């Protein structure tokens, strides 16, 4: 597995999963349009490195995580379920019953001690230190014609709670206002927005460091919905199988990933807001302009020869589908720790993560599906789930066609649909109020007598095992003859 972006890109290239674009392509709309083409091609298209962005001599990398295969390579695993299994084992550590069990546990204990980041003295991300640095030297994209400007779309925004000094790392886009000023689009429900809330209460500046083009695991970790107060770098350490190396920032009291190619250091002032947007968003529509905090840059550090890693969002599927898929798999075992009856869950790409959430459960008691809805609506970023569909454990939630069939055949709308109100994702555009509105749960499980269903529930049509075997034989011979 690779802990640095350039190594990862070189590896993708060797495997034929990366395309180098040698033509001049403009960061103004063109790179985004090419990237969108790649994302919409079968299998998600290759990772792209634009070697000659018009007006810059710094390469731009996009769609790096834009396939299941590359997402797995980024995390150094054969399948996402392998990560899920490792996390499950980590969280199911039992007290050793004897010496043999204790020895068996040692590898996992090793993984635990790998979680903590460690600080190193020198790092490539500080080869060049410019207190007068500006963003003008970086090929930052304008993605869509209606965008309010150029946006840094894949930053690792690093803050600490001013009181507890607990760190948060999140990917929050940044609109470029000028070479030293950007927007800071942390939405109200997110980790760093809470740090900013504390800073504003104290009437203090919040120091912020932004790492660009970090190692692949870190890039994923910034998008992961870690519970508030849990440092994303712990997850990154676990996924990397080694401690994340950090270096002290030059002008702020924060540590930054040594692997980053570029680091922006600065602060957000209490009380300051500025118009941010519009932005062609991952909903497939433009997010409207709104007021957001403002990031002031006071120092830029970088490698001598950085690559600028970015991503393009728009009408799905885009690269973020695969980052989301990783979270779907990685967080399933963690969610199961509090809601063990969950069998599987699926956030289809067209559902933009939380517009449509499909869950299968091992139904144990009347009203169980509604309990799952309530649990999701109260659990971290799952609170954004706008439509939750709950099905029985024998339904494959990864197959949306099967789900559509089951919903159609299992739901009595008046009886099985549950509405509630609560917080919604900041990007929600259909609700009357920003970030607040209604949600819907669909109980598509088989209904029980104890839930008031007094008729007989029909069985799924399946032939006998013997007839099935015979069918296989006959079908093979039919196929061979054709
Ligand atoms: C490409 C990309 C861009 C994102 N942009 C934003 C953004 O501008 N604002 C935001 O609040 N969340 C954004 N997110 C989602 C957050 O990164 C995600 O909710 C993450 O869990 C936030 O971390 P936190 O829980 O520490 O706040 C983005 C995610 C991706 C993959
Ligand atoms: Mn967080």
Image: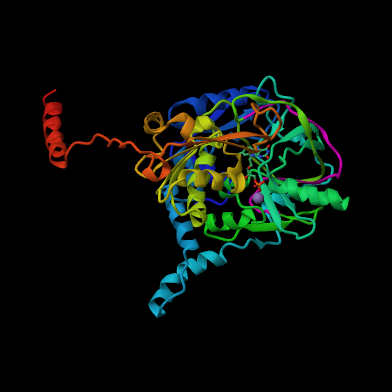
Q: Is residue 187 above or below residue 204?
A: above
Residue 455 can be seen, yes or no: yes
Residue 223 can be seen, yes or no: no
Residue most extreme to the bottom: 99
Q: Residue at x 63, y 61 (%)?
A: 117
Question: For residue 148, which quarter of the picture?
Answer: top right
Q: Where in the figure is residue 261, as x and y percent of width and height? A: 66, 45
Q: Which part of the image, by quadrant, shows the C terminus? A: top left
Q: Give the range drawn in magenta.
A: 256-281
- Magenta highlight on residue 438: no
Q: Where in the figure is residue 218, as x and y percent of width and height? A: 60, 49
Q: Which residue is drawn at 68% across and 61% down?
A: 120
Q: Where in the figure is residue 216, as x and y percent of width and height? A: 56, 46
Instruction: Name the foreground residue: 429 vs 112.
Output: 429
Instruction: Name the foreground residue: 87 vs 137.
Output: 87
- Magenta highlight on residue 280: yes
Question: For residue 478, which quarter of the picture?
Answer: top left
Q: Is residue 436 left or right of residue 385?
A: right
Q: Is residue 307 above or below residue 76?
A: above
Instruction: Name the foreground residue: 334 vs 192.
Output: 334
Residue most extreme to the top: 145
């Amino acid at each position: 597995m690779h802990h640095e972006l350039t190594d990862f890109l070189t590896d993708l290239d060797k495997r034929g999963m990366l395309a180098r674009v040698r033509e001049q392509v403009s960061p103004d709309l063109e790179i985004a349009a090419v990237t969108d083409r790649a994302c919409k091609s079968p299998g998600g298209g290759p990772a792209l490195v634009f070697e000659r962005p018009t007006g810059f001599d710094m390469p731009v990398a996009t769609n790096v995580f834009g396939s299941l295969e590359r997402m797995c390579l980024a995390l150094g695993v054969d399948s996402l379920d392998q990560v899920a299994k490792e996390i499950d084992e980590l969280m199911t550590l039992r007290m050793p019953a004897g010496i043999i069990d204790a020895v068996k546990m040692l590898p996992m204990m090793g993984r635990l001690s790998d979680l903590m980041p460690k600080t190193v003295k020198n790092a490539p991300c500080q080869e060049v230190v410019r207190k007068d640095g500006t963003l003008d030297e970086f090929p930052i994209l304008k993605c869509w014609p209606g965008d309010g400007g150029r946006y840094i779309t894949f930053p690792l925004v690093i803050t600490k709670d001013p009181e507890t000094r607990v760190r948060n790392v999140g990917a929050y886009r940044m609109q470029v206002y000028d070479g030293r000023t950007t927007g800071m689009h942390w939405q109200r429900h997110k980790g760093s927005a809470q740090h900013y809330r504390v800073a504003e209460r104290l009437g203090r500046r919040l120091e912020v460091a932004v790492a660009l083009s970090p190692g692949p695991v870190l890039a994923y970790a910034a998008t992961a919905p870690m519970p508030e107060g849990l440092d994303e770098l712990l997850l990154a350490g676990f996924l990397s199988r080694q401690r994340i190396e950090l270096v002290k920032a030059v002008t702020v009291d924060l540590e930054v990933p040594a692997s980053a190619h570029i680091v922006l250091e600065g602060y957000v002032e209490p009380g300051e807001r500025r118009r941010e947007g519009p932005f062609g968003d991952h909903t497939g529509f433009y997010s409207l302009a709104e007021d957001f905090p403002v990031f002031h840059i006071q120092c830029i550090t970088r490698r001598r020869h950085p690559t600028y890693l970015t991503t393009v969002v728009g009408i799905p599927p885009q690269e973020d589908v695969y980052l989301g898929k990783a979270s779907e798999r990685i967080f399933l075992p963690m969610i199961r720790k509090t809601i063990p009856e969950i069998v599987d869950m699926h956030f289809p790409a067209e559902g933009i993560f939380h517009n449509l959430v499909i869950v299968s459960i091992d139904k144990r008691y009347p009203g169980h599906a509604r309990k799952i809805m309530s649990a999701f609506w109260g659990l971290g970023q799952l609170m954004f789930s706008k439509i939750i569909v709950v099905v029985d454990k024998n339904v494959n939630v990864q197959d949306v066609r099967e789900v559509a069939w089951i919903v159609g055949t299992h739901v009595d709308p008046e009886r099985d649909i549950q509405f509630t109100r609560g917080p919604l994702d900041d990007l929600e555009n259909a609700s009357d109020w920003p970030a607040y509105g209604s949600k819907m749960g669909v109980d598509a499980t088989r209904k029980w007598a104890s839930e008031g269903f007094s008729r007989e529930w029909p069985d799924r049509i399946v032939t006998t095992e013997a007839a099935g075997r015979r069918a296989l034989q006959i079908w093979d011979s039919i196929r061979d003859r054709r």
